[in-house]
Image (cartoon, rainbow, N blue to C red):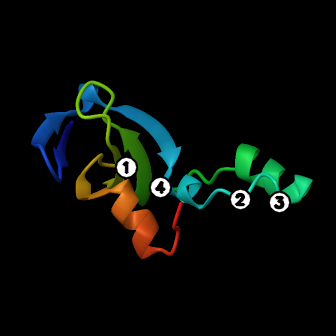
Amino acid sequence: MIINHPLLGPRDAAEFTYLGDASLIHRPDGMEASLDEMHDFTYLRDNPAGAHRELWYHEQGDRSWLVVTRNTLTHEITRVEMAREVALAEGRSR
């Protein structure tokens, strides 16, 4: 599988580590969240069929975090974005 890195161009997926659902960008504040909120964030995950936004870490490259939109049935990648830009666009400042 080839991931078209926004800064570095096409890269083999072997250079990356898959880190799960991109909703992890929206982690609750561990100092203010309830135990139920932290439990749900830590343990509950969707397992969708079809288009899905995922976090990938460029471990064997520039160590960037990416949000990859990938079809889980065909493995076709339709979009790749820098995770920092996604987080900022969605209102996360830290």
* Distance between the alpha carbons at the discs numbered 2 and 3: 6 Å
Q: Disc 3 marks which residue?
A: 33
Q: Disc 4 marks which residue?
A: 49
Numbered label attached to residue 73: 1
Q: Residues within 10 Å of mark 3 (few under 14, many from 20)?
A: few
Q: Earlier in the sequence, mark 1 or mark 4?
A: 4
**Whether residue 79 is situated above or below residue 14 in the rendered picture:** below
* Distance between the alpha carbons at the discs numbered 1 and 4: 6 Å
Numbered label attached to residue 55: none
The amino acid on which the numbered mark 3 sits, given as a three-letter code, is Ala
User: Which secondary structure, mark 4?
Assistant: loop
Q: Earlier in the sequence, mark 1 or mark 3?
A: 3
Circles 1 and 4, Cβ within 8 Å, touching? The answer is yes
User: Which secondary structure, mark 3?
Assistant: loop
Residue 50 appears in the figure: no
Is 12 or 34 nearer to us in this picture?
Answer: 34
Numbered label attached to residue 28: 2
* Distance between the alpha carbons at the discs numbered 4 and 2: 26 Å
Task: Please tell me which residue is depicted at 25% across the width and 53% down the height of the picture.
Answer: 77
Nearer the observer: mark 4 or 3; the answer is: 3
* Distance between the alpha carbons at the discs numbered 2 and 1: 30 Å
* Distance between the alpha carbons at the discs numbered 1 and 3: 34 Å
User: Which secondary structure, mark 2?
Assistant: loop
Q: Earlier in the sequence, mark 4 or mark 3?
A: 3
